[in-house]
Amino acid sequence: MASLEALSKSYSIKKAQVSKLRKQAESKLKEALSKKRRSSSGLATLEKKKEELVRAKDHAMQVLNQHLSQKASIERLKIAADERLKQEQNTKDEAKQQSEFGPAEEKANALQRLKFADEKIAELHAELKERESTQARLEKEIESSLKEKAKIEEQLKKQIHAKPTLIEQLKVGTKEEVRLRPKFQSLQKSESQVSNTLTQVRKKLALLAAAKRKRMAALAAAKRRRIALL
């Protein structure tokens, strides 16, 4: 009985020690698994964000190129309009001279040409004004597209710099899991074995205690019967 009680106490102490070590290993394993999940999730999010940024950059480049092409076209149209304006101005000057100093029979035609030239010059001025307005708008849009492109490229750089850190965290978490899982499982098995053994010892102690109580009760009953016979 005494040896079983000592054994029960020994296994109780051992169970407490193993449980403490198992909880410590479990806590460290959970932290390693959490590190793995966070880094893995971070890498997945990073890759998704990278794809979104690449698409956004491609779109920004497409818009930028479109605006640059439109600006170049506007500049060509402005040059052409300036050339036509010079021609019309020359035509106007000639028509004006003829209307003032030319023969009488040519003055009427000269005045007609002068009127037509004035109308054409007014149209060209309006066209140039419209082209300049469009060009100014395009320049603002180009500036905005360049800023957007630079912003996306900066975000992409941050993504690129963040990836190695997450990969390293994933490696560390994986190594820790590989190291800690067998230890945790071993301690878990030991705890279970110690617990089962302790349960068996306590059952034996309980049976012995019950048998002792039964013997003591029988002795007490016999004693009472002897006393009653006296």
Image: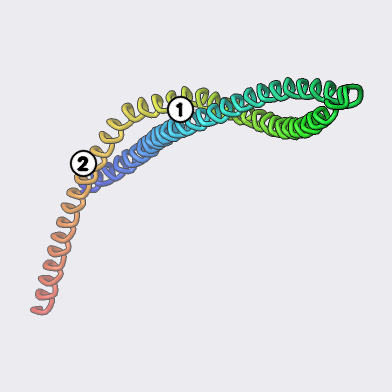
Q: Is residue 141 left or right of residue 97?
A: left
Picture layout, residue 72 above or below residue 125: above
Q: Is residue 203 left or right of residue 27?
A: left
Which residue bears the numbered disc 1? 166
Q: Is residue 50 left or right of residue 144?
A: left
Which residue bears the numbered disc 2? 193
Residue in the foreground of this view, choosing between 124 and 35: 124
Picture layout, residue 102 above or below residue 38: above
Q: Looking at the picture, how far across and down is residue 168, in whole percent? A: 44, 23
* Quarter occupied by the C terminus: bottom left
Residue in the foreground of this view, choosing between 79 and 108: 108
- For the residues labelled 1 and 2, the Cα–Cα distance comes to 40 Å
Residue in the foreground of this view, choosing between 152 and 114: 114
Residue most toward the right? Answer: 101
Q: Residues within 10 Å of mark 1 (few under 14, many from 20)?
A: many
Q: Which amino acid lies under the numbered mark 1 shown in the image of this protein?
A: Leu
